[in-house]
Image (spheres, rainbow, N blue to C red):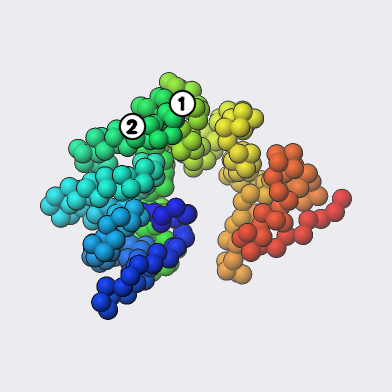
Amino acid sequence: MKSPIFFLIIFPAFFCKNVFSQPDASTQRNKADSLMNEGNIPEAIVQYKRLYSLNPKDKSIAYNYACALSIDNSVIKQFDSCFKYLNIAIELDTSVIALTDPDLIPAREDEKWDVFENRLISMLNIKYNNPYKDIEYAKALLKLGAYDQAYFNEIGIVFRKFGMRSSVASALWRLKFMIQEKNQKELEQLVEAKGWPKIGEVGSEAAMAAYLVAIHSNDGSQKKYLPVIRQRCEENELPWQRYANIYDRCLFNENKPQKYGTHTRYNDLTKSEELYPLEDETKVDEWRKELGLEPLAEYLARFNIKFQPKQK
């Protein structure tokens, strides 16, 4: 699921003429999106269907409608409708997002997916001057990226309704770990055969998918990929923030203090996020500056975490 143009968490208002006593499109859209985000897919489908009938040229409505149909695949020929609106959406807005969207994982299992995927990649290559040169490698990485992001929304729903320590949450996390292990093995095979992906060969989204799988892999894989990730940052293939993230993640997994200050942890007593311990508070901004990163206090302010570095 996506919101048009902006990030996934942003819900911009789209205004249209009211139809009799109908609420405006933005109100209906927020209702449909809210139903989707809370897991009430059947009702979300009803709302998206109504929205689409009023706004057939709205790319985000068509796309989110397709995502809802993908998730709610119990109805006979539901996938036919899913792909109908997916194809409408990519005609209105030729975007790669469908190839990395976890909501479309059920649709990936349908025989029509390959035709849709090949069509979209062809359209993207035409629109963006051939970013996908190694198409099969790109497709494999984009699939890993979709699975890497799978079920986070469902986990969020469970947390809100049943708490972080519920049996349902534990079951979903076990499923996530199984997916991550499978992704890790597939990435290792791909990298062994093809080398670490480059944007010029597979596109930026597929290259980023490889990074996401790596940072969500076990400690050994993260350490193994550190040198090549640093190399890709030096080649401007990845932002240095990504190197700092995975470097600190390796330390975090070993229960060691972090170097760059990219990780936080949840404090059960204060019921809030706090900075994970640092290797050296007096040097952290110096180390971050070497990578071209902003001061740690500015970075943490985005998460409403106050930080005053110690002076040497």
Where is residue 136? Give x, y as percent.
35, 27
Q: Residue furthest top?
A: 193
Query: Are the residues at dot 2 and dot 1 in contact (C-beta closer than 8 Å)?
Result: no
Q: Which residue type does callout 2 highlight?
A: Ser
Badge 2 element: helix
| Vertical relation: 279 (above or below) 133 | below
* Residue situated furthest right in the rendering: 312
Q: Residue at x 46, y 38 (%)?
A: 205
Direction bottom: furthest residue: 21
| Residue 190 seen from this side | no
Instruction: Judge depth for marks 2 and 1 and give the one in front.
Output: 2
Compare marks 2 and 1 and give the one earlier in the sequence.
2
* Residue 37, position as x, y percentages in the image: 37, 62
Q: Quadrant of residue 122?
A: top left
Residue 201 tag number: 1
Image-quadrant location for residue 286: top right
Q: Residues within 10 Å of mark 1 (few under 14, many from 20)?
A: some
Which residue is at a point 27% across and 79% down the rendered structure image?
Answer: 21
Figure quadrant of residue 42:
bottom left
Left or right relative to 23: residue 300: right
Q: Which residue is mark 2?
A: 122
Q: Is residue 262 visible?
A: yes
Q: Position of residue 272 (x, y in %)?
A: 59, 66
C-alpha span from label 2 to label 1: 15 Å
For label 2, the crowd category at 10 Å Cα-Cα, with few meaning under 14, some 14 to 19 and many 20 or more, is some
Which quadrant: the N terminus?
bottom left
Q: Which percent across, then down, holds residue 23?
A: 32, 75
Q: Could you say whether the residue bearing mark 1 is in a helix, strand or loop? A: helix
* Residue 95 or residue 231, whichever sits in front: 95
Q: Which mark is residue 1?
A: none
Q: Residue at the location (60% across, 39% down)?
A: 239
Three-letter code for the amino acid on which mark 1 is drawn: Glu
